[in-house]
Amino acid sequence: MARGERGATLIAESERTDRPSASPWRALRIVGVWKRFGAVNGEAPWVLRDISLDLEAGSFTCIVGPSGCGKTTLLSLLAGFDQPTRGVIAVDERPITGPGRDRAVIFQDVANALFPWLNAVENVEFGLRVQGLPRQACRERALQYLALVGLREDREKFPFQLSGGMKQRIQIARALANDPAVLLMDEPFAGLDAITRRDLQEELVRIWERTRKTIVFITHDIIEALLLGTRVIVMGAGPGTVRGDFRVPLSRPRSPSHPEFMRRYDELQGILESEVRRGRPGPGEG
């Protein structure tokens, strides 16, 4: 099906009632998406322009780009927190019309991500309790995912007793406990020290290899993107457009010192440097 035909099909579907898919899904689809906010002097600038991507089920996609290129806006649209101005975002042919349990968002701001009055295991099981699962089932599942992120022994600790890295692990465990199909991660390790960040990168790859959740991961860091992703999307300086789409066939564990890693790093860095220069105001501008 051509892109225009598929977009028309999805737009028609978006007018119907959102309903669960009867079979396993294949791709998170972004079709001809444009986005602007509000109005400035009658017409606001575009934040995203004509984005079209298929993110396959089970993939680990990293999105990199200069500040202000629309990465977080795109993630919010995938989460269903907002809707495109034009175009459609869908799971296969089923448009996303709002937040859903099939998508979990993991934020950068770990300081405010957890409930301070709940301990670690209570934070992880919170969403399960809201769904009405039996208390014992909630506790067992929460402990299972705390063990997956290496924090079962810290289950009784409250957020003020935890490091930033431990809080982020709990946020990941809480998301996984609800069994989403997709993890949407907005620079989740950006505020951590280098050692903790590297530990959590390795932990996330291990969890992905075990669960094969579909992950969409926003980052400014090219090395992080190449260490983690099966695919790297490069977004350009505003308004947001896709400037590059790269598969990452490197075997794991990956090392920045590997010649192929370095070659791909140089390629991505060249695109980003060009985008940063393009986004700077010229003489007499700004």
Image (tube, helix red, strand yellow):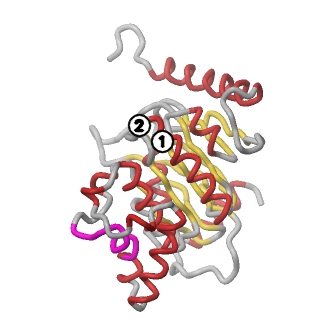
Q: Position of residue 261 (x, y in %)?
A: 71, 30
Q: From the viewer's side, name the closer residue of 209 and 156.
A: 156
Q: Amino acid at mark 1?
A: Arg
Q: Which residues make up the magenta segment?
A: 117-125
Check disc 2: other Cα within 10 Å, few if <14, some if 14-19, many if 20+. few
Q: Quadrant of residue 133?
A: bottom left
The answer to the question of whether label 1 and label 2 lie on touching residues, with beta carbons closer than 8 A, is: yes
Task: Please give the residue where the numbered disc 1 appears in the rendered image.
Answer: 197
Furthest residue to the bottom? 134
Displayed quadrant of residue 129: bottom left
Please give left or right for residue 29 compared with residue 159 in the image: right
Front residue (pair 48, 42)? 48
Q: Residue at x 56, y 68 (%)?
A: 95
Mark 1 neighbour class, 10 Å CA radius: few under 14, some 14 to 19, many 20 or more: some
Magenta stretch: helix, strand or loop mostly: helix
Q: Which residue is drawn at the image coordinates 39% and 76% (left, top)? A: 125
State the residue position of label 2: 193
Q: Identify which residue, 236 or 285, lies in the foreground.
A: 236
Check disc 2 and give the amino acid type.
Asp
Numbered mark located on residue 262 in the image: none
Q: Quadrant of the N terminus?
A: bottom right
* Nearer to us in this view, 134 or 285: 134
